Image: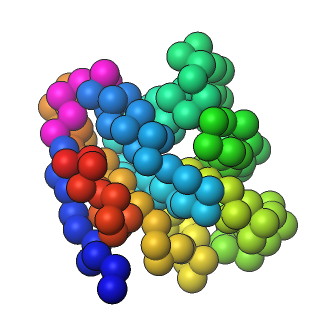
Amino acid sequence: MSEPSATVLRELPDLDATAALAAAVAALARPGDAILLDGPFGAGKTAFARAFLRAATGDAALDVPSPSFTLVQTYETRQGRVHHFDLWRLDGPAALTELGWDEMRDDIVLVEWPQRLGALRPADALGVDLALLAGEARRATLSGWAGRIGALA
């Protein structure tokens, strides 16, 4: 029997703390995983994604542009391919088929604005909900990844 999913709350006082959490998530990620980044504009979704990709590639200077206009960028990492999606401009889940969503799900997918996934939202994903606090501070609520989420507490 698998372990039930839990929720972990993390206070992130600054961008370095956000980057450290993203690196911890990257260390646990494996092919077939989905990491869903949620939160309002300015909550740190793209900062989290950049830190995740830099940690996963081992390249602290990696250029990670926001895929706002291209919708998806692909990176080769130590864990395999990671597809970074920004679905803000997506006009619905049907457009994901054209982007190759089904094929990319064999790799790691990192998704900003996951509510645009609709019925394609993976049930076994790690949800990372980022909330704005004062200044650079954020609160991350992580849920999913039964059996692995405890390492993020």
Residue lying at the far right of the rendered structure: 98
Segment colored magenta: 11-16
Q: Is 59 displayed left or right of 130 in the figure?
A: right
Residue 92 picture location, percent across and down:
66, 72
The part of the image, by quadrant, that contains residue 60 is top right
Residue in front for this viewpoint, 65 or 4 = 4
Q: Is 41 displayed left or right of 72 in the figure?
A: left
Residue 76 picture location, percent across and down:
72, 37
Q: Is 52 displayed left or right of 43 in the figure?
A: right
Q: How many marks?
A: 0
Against 133, residue 140 (above or below) is below
The residue depicted at 80 percent of the width and 61 percent of the height is: 99
Q: Is 123 displayed left or right of 59 in the figure?
A: left
Residue lying at the far bottom of the rendered structure: 1
Say which quadrant the N terminus sits in: bottom left
Say if the magenta span includes residue 97: no
Residue 136 picture location, percent across and down:
25, 26
The residue depicted at 57 percent of the width and 23 percent of the height is: 58
The residue depicted at 53 percent of the width and 60 percent of the height is: 34
The part of the image, by quadrant, that contains residue 20 is top left
Is residue 38 at all visible to an observer of this figure? yes
Against 44, residue 33 (above or below) is below
Say if the magenta span includes residue 12: yes
Q: How is the image coloured?
A: rainbow
Residue lying at the far front of the rendered structure: 1
Is residue 85 at all visible to an observer of this figure? no
